Image (cartoon, rainbow, N blue to C red):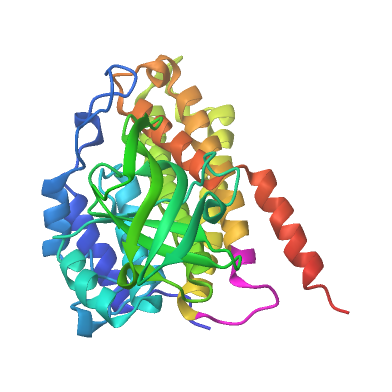
Amino acid sequence: MDFTFTEEQQAAAEAARGVFADVAPDAVPSPTLTRGAVADDFDRALWGRLADADLLSLLLDPEHGGAGLDSIALCLVLREAGKVLARVPLLENSAALAAVQAYGGAELKSAVLEPAGRGEVVLTVAAQGRTGGHDAAERAVTARRDGDGWVLDGVQTAVPWAYDADFTVVPAHTDADRSVLALVPRGQEGAELAEQFATTGERLGELRLESVQVPERYVIEGEGAWEWLRELLATGTCALALGLGERVLRMTSEYTGKREQFGYPVATFQAVAVQAADRYIDLRAMEATLWQAAWRIGSGAAGVLPAAGDVAVAKIWAAEGVRRVVQTAQHLHGGFGADVDYPLHRYHAWAKHLELSLGPAAAHEEALGDLLAAHAPG
């Protein structure tokens, strides 16, 4: 069995490295040193470069102006984005486009796919529910038919890039207890935003929906659409965490290789080397479980467990692993680890945000246990 990435996937990763080469995470203000959001908008210049490199349309079929690649290619690009803390809605936009392509109607595809693939339209996803991930996101909003459209009521919290996206993909449940996805345009009557802030200092939005009318063409009713989108978002978040962790371990290696105590680099001390080695193992486990989950989602391959099982394992390792990596980095950096002007501080803030987005490992372990019990032989 060949586990190497395809030429197309490697080309996407190489293009991403070129686009992100000039991104400097330390150029963005520290979230603890600013009042309000660290910036009013995401990095539009970087967004334009991603569009020019055809990295916003990776998952779109050629008929929609895309490269026709899979979730593995997307995660390779997101891994590079995580290394530089790229301030763009790359994950949310890409995942939403993939869901529209896979489950949306012809009119919705025509209106959204190609413009968004060119970077002219931006999509985000409300995936945290009413209480920041503690409840199922689709239970936070109700959707009912009204004539030739739908009416939405409810609240979605911690919506990333909510103030900047042209459409927010909102999961909702119907009277028949089915899940639908509604694309709510920015500024739609009855939809209000309340400002929130992530640990990264980025602005989030609490989306309040009161009798919001959405045309039929902007609603996706496909069976399993929300579940698939949710798993792709989670897997993409694991890719961001992997890239972040790899860059932090590299920063730690460079620092401990230069910092001397008693005339020797601290990297040569056994206690330091063992801690760094443990974090390297964390990253390799995060990587292995990420590619397994991305492959299952992208290929639709059958297995003993549904793809949700592989995603749960990837989330367990990513949530725990990225936290351990940044905590060890701060410890081994000594006083620099607590300096909010040093780039490591921003990586720690982003790592905490990603960990919270993924949710506690214990919850994923419980979900994995339920899946194992449900699919046990006999």
- Give whichever of 321, 372 is nearer the camera: 372
Q: State yes or no: residue 306 in magenta.
A: yes
In percent of width and height, residue 165 lies at 24, 50
> On the rendered structure, is 213 left or right of 42?
right
5 in relation to 211, above or below:
below
Q: Which residue is drawn at 17% across and 53% down?
A: 47
The residue drawn where x is 68% and y is 73% is: 305
Q: Where residue 313 appears, x then y in whole percent? A: 62, 58
Asked where in the image residue 175 lies, by quadrant, the reply is: bottom right
Indicate yes or no whether the magenta region holds residue 345. Answer: no
Q: Can residue 177 be seen in this view?
A: yes
Residue 85, percent from left and from top: 30, 42
Pick out the residue farthest to the right.
378
The residue segment tinted magenta is 300-310
Q: How many marks?
A: 0
In which quadrant of the rendered view does residue 36 lie? top left
> Quadrant of the rendered structure where residue 311 is?
bottom right
State the quadrant of the C terminus.
bottom right
Report if residue 91 is visible in the image.
no
Q: Look at the magenta stretch and give its main secondary structure.
A: loop
The front one of 213 and 251 is 213
Q: Is residue 5 found left or right of 281 in the rendered image?
A: left
Task: Give the answer, above or below, for where 21 lies relative to 325.
Answer: below
| Residue positioned 29% across, 80% down in the render | 68
Q: Which residue lies furthest to the front in this view?
A: 147
Residue drawn at x 59%, y 28% is 271
**Is residue 284 toward the left or the right of residue 55 in the image?**
right
x then y, percent, for residue 126: 41, 51
